Every structure is written in C-alpha cells, then in structure tokens.
Image: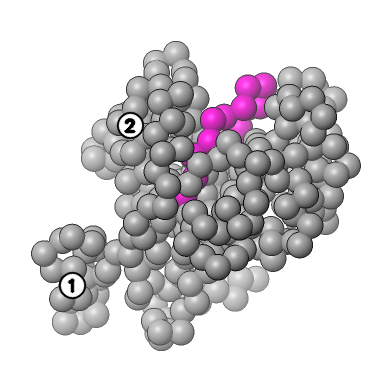
Amino acid sequence: MSNAPKQDEPFDPDKVPVKPAATVLLVRDGDEGLEVFMLRRTFSAAFASGMFVFPGGKVDEVDASTEIGDICEGLSDEQASSLLGIPSGGLAYWVASIRECFEEAGVLLAHHRESGEVVRFDDPAVADRFENERENIHDGSLALLDLCRRENLHLSTHNIHYVSHWITPKGERRRFDTRFFVARAPEAQEPLHDDGETIESMWINPHEAIRRHREGDLMLMPPTLANIEFIAAHPTADEVIAAAAKVGTPTTILPKLKVDGDGRVTGIAMPGDPDYDAL
C-alpha cells in the first residue's frame, strides 16, 4: 500500500525536499523526419500521472558510486560537475539518465569497451539477456556498474549532452531538480515502455507533439514542452546533437505557481513574465 499523501491533505511547502533527477531525450531520423521517444506515465503515479514524458527519474545513491567513473567514457565527474555548476557529483546525473532510460525504455546507452561498438539487441539471445538485466536493475538486485563490468561495457556518457535545467515550483507536493539531456537513439535497440511506471510509448515528430499538445490531445508539462520546442528547431538528429553539444551550462528555470485567495493554483509564471518577481 502506498504511503504517499493524498492530494487534498495539507502539507508544508517549505518542507518538501527538492530531489535531484535526470531525463534524456532520445532522438532519431524517422521516415517523416526527426523523431523523439516519449512515454506515458501511469495514471496512478504520484507525480505527472498520465503525462507524456521522456525516460528519466531520480538520481540514486548507486549512480554516484565512487567506482562509477571507471565505466564512463570521455567524461569525468569534475567535467560533469563543472557543466552542471555544482561542486561535485555531476557524473551521477549522466549515469542516472542512462540507468533510467534502460529501466523505463529498455534502451542502454553503452558500447563495448574494447571495440567501441554500440550495444545492439538484434540478436534474440542478447535481447533476452539484457531484458532480464533490465528487470534486475529496475528492482535493485543488480547495479549498472556490475552489469557493465560483466558485459565489458562502457557507458556512452560522452555522447549525452546536457541541454536544460528545471526545478519544480515551490508549492508542489513533489519537487525535482531535473537536468535534461539529449542523445541519439542507438540502432538495433527498440525502446518500449515497462508496463509499470509507464503504460504507453511512441516515437513522435516534435512539431506533431507541439500541435497535439495545443489541441489538448497530448498532456505535457512545461519542461517537456520546452525541450520539445528546442529540438523542433532542428530538422535532423545530427543537427539536434550538434546544437545540444553547444549549449554548455543552461540557465536554471524555476517556475512559480499563481495562487488565488483561497489557495487554489490558477496558473504558472515563468522567469521573464511580468508577474514573476512579485510572486
């Protein structure tokens, strides 16, 4: 039974922890142009229920293992932390984005240590083996570090690009300090929702996603929409990756809730909006 607070129960906004999180936009070139992979969260989820999102989730302690740097290609904790603007522990966000992508979508952003070849799941035996490992990582019985050592893999952290930083507004029951990343979807790996935390999945053109959201057909949170708009400015996966690689350290975005006299949320103010500073 869940111990999560009910939506109508009172809570102290000042005591809601802001948890570190990471999410990754998988992009590819489809028959109709650029596509991004999206998942729909279960309607029973405590956060973002029914919303379409990118693979991602909280940064766990295991993501910050002292040995994790041994399996990360081309990116040190010092470099990662500098990009994120934090003293240390930055590499854990890249690792979390990879782990969550594997858990939620079944896509492993990794390559063979010796050959450099990207991991492929087109061999049924390999696909079955990694599907079992996906479940083991999801339930915590196996660490990503141990999987990589067993399979002689390195995480492709050098090909995952940091593009935006959003913090959930104060006043929400659950708050996250989320770093968004972009990566090219590997060939010979077909993503699929886990039928647990996520109940639906799809590849979609960014412009189609924006149109459907405006028509009320696709439920998106503001950070999700903003990141879709970022990739929509580029027609191909190559151009998205090139643009993402040039972002550097993005400006942190902290929306604020608009609340009426009865304490009901009536809207969201974004940095730069006329009423933002007054809230």
Magenta residues, start to end: 180-194
Residue for point 66% across, 27% down: 189
Q: Which type of secondary structure does the marked residue at label 1 adopt? A: loop
Quarter of the image for residue 169 reads bottom left
Q: Is the magenta region chiefly helix, strand or loop?
A: loop
Residue 22 in the image: state x and y as whole percent: 53, 54
Instruction: Give the colour scheme of this rendering.
Output: one colour
For the residue pair 38 and 154, the one nearer the viewer reads as: 154
Residue for point 24% across, 80% down: 263
Quarter of the image for residue 78 reads bottom right
Considering only vertical position in the picture, is 188 above or below 278? above
C-alpha span from label 1 to label 2: 30 Å
Judging by the rendered image, the residue that carries numbered circle 2 is 232
Residue 93 in the image: state x and y as whole percent: 58, 55
- Quarter of the image containing the C terminus? bottom left
For the residue pair 168 and 265, the one nearer the viewer reads as: 168
Relative horizontal placement of residue 158, taking residue 35 as reference (left or right):
right
Q: Which type of secondary structure does the marked residue at label 2 adopt? A: helix
- Quarter of the image containing the N terminus? bottom right
Judging by the rendered image, the residue that carries numbered circle 1 is 277
User: At label 2, which amino acid type do we have?
Assistant: Ala
Kindly tell me whether residue 239 is visible in this rendering: yes
Kindly tell me whether residue 39 is visible in this rendering: no
Relative horizontal placement of residue 171, taking residue 125 as reference (left or right):
left
Residue for point 73% across, 52% down: 69
